[in-house]
Image: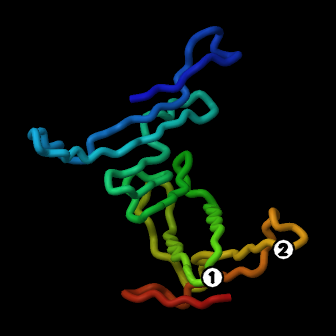
Amino acid sequence: TIYFGGKDEESAGTNVLGAKIVAQAAGLWETGASDNDAPTELQFFTQSDGGTDNLATPKMVIRDHGYVGIGTTSPDASLEIVNFNSGSWQASTIVDITSYSDTVTHPSVLNLRKSKYVSGETPLATADDEDLGQIAFYGTSDESPDAFKLAAYILCEQDASATTTMSGRLK
């Protein structure tokens, strides 16, 4: 474990722990002389403003298989971001993915998932006409190559109540 701490104006000279990184076994470590089997994940903890101890749950993890989770300790994809803060789901999660490439034929795949949630309860099904996700597309111009500008967006709404299949419409 690596600890990060220091002093601030309110701590009256007392060291305060602000963050830590933990290397945690992610499975059984084989200890034989020829074995190099030690699955390990890295867990990143940071202290939020306000005095409540937030160092009990990692803010980000890198799993032994390379998946990165921000806001979740069990990511199911290369990068999974869950915006869960202070016991309530936030209104939106914004993710910027920027790619600089000299090719035009390498598309990216982005999955947007939505479920209704009330603090302390089981997630609920989404409903007809509910906004499921939005993708915004930005580009740069010759006049401002370092400034991204909105070019278009796609909004998906749920079409009818969900059963075993899900249908939606793009706007």
Image coordinates for residue 164, horizontal then vertical, percent:
37, 87
| Residue at x-position 49% and y-position 51% | 71
Q: Is residue 10 above or below residue 74?
A: above
Left or right, 118 with respect to 75, comes to right
Left or right, 156 with respect to 138, comes to left
- Which label is found at residue 141? 2
Q: Quadrant of the C terminus?
A: bottom right
Q: Secondary structure at mark 2?
A: loop
Q: Residues within 10 Å of mark 1 (few under 14, many from 20)?
A: few
Visible in this render: residue 92?
Answer: no
- Which label is found at residue 104? 1
Q: Quadrant of the N terminus?
A: top left
| Residue at x-position 63% and y-position 71% | 101
- Which label is found at residue 26? none
Left or right, 86 with respect to 41, comes to right
| Residue at x-position 65% and y-position 63% | 96
Q: Secondary structure at mark 1?
A: loop
Amino acid type of disc 2? Ser
Q: CA distance from mark 1 to mark 2?
A: 17 Å
Outermost residue, left side: 32
Outermost residue, right side: 143
